[in-house]
Image: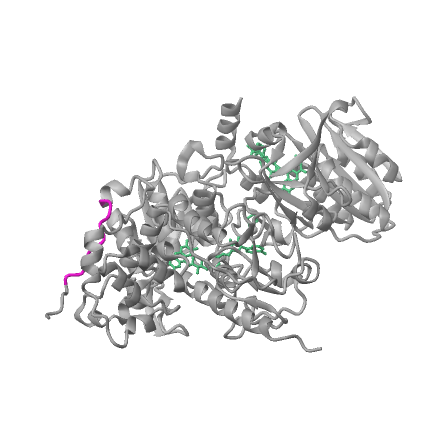
Amino acid sequence: MPLNLNRVSMPEQEPEVRCHNFKEVNLGLSMESARAEAGRCLFCKRPTCIEGCPVSINIPHFIRAILDNDPHEAVRRIRVDNPLPAICGRVCPQESQCEAACVLNKKGAPVAIGALERYVGDYAIREGLKAECVVKEKKLKAAVVGSGPSGLTCAGELRKLGYAVTVFEALHELGGVLTYGIPEFRLPQEAVVKFEIEALRTMGVEFKTNRLIGKTHLISDLMEIEGFAAVYIATGAGYPQFMRIPGEDLNYVYSANEFLTRMNLMQAYQGDAAATPIFVGKRVAVIGGGNTAMDAARCALRMPGVEKVSLIYRRSEKEMPARVEEAKHAQEEGIEFQFLTAPTEYLGTPEGAVRTARCIRMALGEPDASGRRRPVVIPGSEFEIEVDAVVVAIGTQANPIIAQTTPGLETNKWGYIVADQNGLTSLQNIYAGGDIVSGAATVILAMGAGRKAAQAIDRALSVPAPH
Amino acid sequence: MFDIISKQLIAPAVWRQTIKAPEIAGKRQAGNFVIIRPKVGSERIPLTIVSSDNQRGTIDIIFQVVGATTMDLAEVESVQDILGPLGHPTHIANFGRTAVVGGGVGIAPLLPIAQALKQAGSRLTTILGARSKAFLILEEDMAPISDQLLIATDDGSKGQKGLVTEILKPLLEEKKIDFVLAIGPVVMMKAVSELTRPYGVKTMVSLNPLMIDGTGMCGVCRCKIEGQTKFACVDGPEFDGHQVDFENLTRRLAMYKSEENQRREARK
Ligand SMILES: Cc1cc2nc3c(=O)[nH]c(=O)nc-3n(C[C@H](O)[C@H](O)[C@H](O)COP(=O)(O)OP(=O)(O)OC[C@H]3O[C@@H](n4cnc5c(N)ncnc54)[C@H](O)[C@@H]3O)c2cc1C
Ligand SMILES: Cc1cc2nc3c(=O)[nH]c(=O)nc-3n(C[C@H](O)[C@H](O)[C@H](O)COP(=O)(O)OP(=O)(O)OC[C@H]3O[C@@H](n4cnc5c(N)ncnc54)[C@H](O)[C@@H]3O)c2cc1C
Ligand code: FES
């Protein structure tokens, strides 16, 4: 049989339409095109795609069920490895993971695994399929701190293993970055994120919002007073970083977290209908080249009155850490990319609103520790751009609250929690994973860490205590 | 949901509420605050915990109705979300001859700290400022813990006519004060800090920038302290008044003035 290199393309809203709305950009595959795409899978004896997946989802197994016209079974199969398929299908960087490892990638047309995963996740949502979960109760309690992808995955896994699981979340909504960070047009809140979290609730996971661990309860309270046998810390890396250049404290210079939190968590994208305001003006500059920068730029572009959004990134297009699809979508929508450029200073109006971003051009020098070529300043290349708002999306750091309030919890020099390959920290029965251990990474890596830690917790607690 | 057990109008547009929140009551120390979201869809706003009752599992807040969110809070019977206790608790010690200076609704956050300072052995000179007699709050709570209680009102309807700084200045002049804690409008905290600086008297202030999450996640609460950026919700809210860039704070507080006014008018 000749190889079918006719990879399905994801239907999407037209750029000139979608740049004025917050509805989802990607529309999802129809049943016919999903089946046709599933038919391109070679069902390799040694599936390299599974090796390419950080959580080793049995990809051919669920693709087979799509091909067999049994999406119900596909849902069941994917949920064995991944409780959040509709989310991962939308936000994972498949092009550098499973799809990169697909043998058809050598021919330039890997199976659209991400689109198929999303198809299966969306089928579960459309049909309202509840997670099946026959639990043999263990009569032991486990606590999870933080309800981002890492905490959610760990909670689901521990629940399946029979633990009574409580998730403590500081914000008033669950989901971590999935809720406060990633915008509606990429990951719909109500339809997708809430559905997949609800599926965990029906499995018996208990959720407690409005609890900042380290303040409302200490980690030691959870163990000693509340009687949790183990704790998994998955608090993310949500502490915004600034560049420490003059003028960063001017009004309407936002951290990406503030900008996206106003937009998404507090729903400022709904305009006057939302209580929490956001000011964007006409000209917006976004600093950075990751997913966060793309999301902020594309949110800004969609706000009424915005005329121009510039994305300012200090390296070249090749080094941008954003998902390829996000950068492509951003470009199509009309975001202006200023590569090899960095701001050096912001100047303001007499009232203190940001007015001008003073920038400088860069050239690529020798590779740095990350292997990417280090940007170096081109002297004398300064120029200015007029702005009404600036979003600083240059990365995040570790939030200090848990480390400050948990004596004996080892952290590294950047404040991230030190944990071994199973997530065990320096304290007994206290585990950690996701961005708070790795530094800002990806949804799927955070999920993988959650799953590993759940299994390690189960092993540790299954050993009978010595007398 | 968190039930409001009782509410009381203690001055024009100033409410005291007792809210059932046992987990927060159990952990709260002087100087802590909470983030409150009165209803689904409301903003999240910071308010100081004025007192707590661990037995009953309640906390008290005192707030002035100034905009849409505080209007909502004054109306609801139970609040949707409360997060806390937040911020570093106040460093409490015997600071010797201490002036606690409160202005307007800033007297509310001042009260629990003054109580704790008194308990630690500090000698309290309490200076309260208000627009007029009607707007002066918590005088009866401050009186029993104060070694000396002095009042200034803008119109002279109670105590001395004028500003709190006019009362504080002669005390500094006579070298009667070792430590100052001031909480109130930004202009007042700034004036007090500027007044004490030449005397070299350590002065702490409690900053009230805009906040959203209160957990160190968004950075909207960033303040300039000795030229360094600090997040008031996790690094504060109390800072050394001689190190605070008050102009920066004033400017950042005005960021959403026009949106706030619009929303307040729309609520009316
Ligand atoms: C805007 C943006 C876009 C992104 N896009 C992508 C993408 O397309 N694809 C991708 O793979 N990755 C993306 N990422 C990265 C990805 O979202 C993160 O790597 C992932 O969310 C990390 O998961 P986590 O569970 O470790 O932490 P988080 O998702 O950060 O969740 C941590 C949770 O813990 C809570 N918390 C913190 N401290 C406490 C405490 N003391 N007590 C209680 N709760 C606490 C927080 O409120 C939060 O809800 C993006 C990140 C951002 C910011
Ligand atoms: C740590 C902390 C503790 C606080 N404790 C108290 C307290 O115990 N009692 C109390 O009444 N208030 C307190 N505040 C101030 C309170 O949070 C604001 O008054 C409230 O957010 C106003 O919300 P609103 O939607 O009703 O008004 P908005 O519509 O947001 O604002 C109305 C007016 O109030 C001003 N304003 C808005 N936010 C603040 C602010 N953070 N500080 C000062 N003025 C502001 C605006 O500039 C505007 O003029 C505290 C603030 C902080 C940061
Ligand atoms: S309020 Fe968001 S970081 Fe302080």
Q: Residue at x 53, y 35 (%)?
A: B42
The verdict on residue A13 being magenta is yes
Image coords of residue A361 (percent x, y)? 33, 60
* Residue B169 seen in this snapshot: yes
Q: Residue at x 51, y 73 (%)?
A: A422
Image coords of residue A231 (percent x, y)? 59, 63
Asked which quadrant contains residue A93, the reply is: bottom left
User: Could you tell whether B248 is left or right of A406 in the image?
Assistant: left
Above or below: residue A36 compared with residue A299: below
Asked which quadrant contains residue B254, the reply is: top right
> Which residue is most to the right?
B147
User: Could you tell whether A294 is left or right of A418 in the image?
Assistant: left
Image coords of residue B134 (percent x, y)? 75, 23
The verdict on residue A363 being magenta is no
Image coords of residue B133 (percent x, y)? 77, 24
Query: What secondary structure predominates along the stretch shown in magenta?
Result: loop
Asked which quadrant contains residue B73, the reply is: top right
Closer-to-camera residue (B140/A255): B140
* Residue A96 seen in this snapshot: no
The N terminus of chain A appears in which quarter of the rendering?
bottom left
> Which residue is most to the left?
A2
Closer-to-camera residue (A367/B2): B2
Q: Write down the region rendered in magenta.
A: A6-14
Closer-to-camera residue (B55/A374): B55
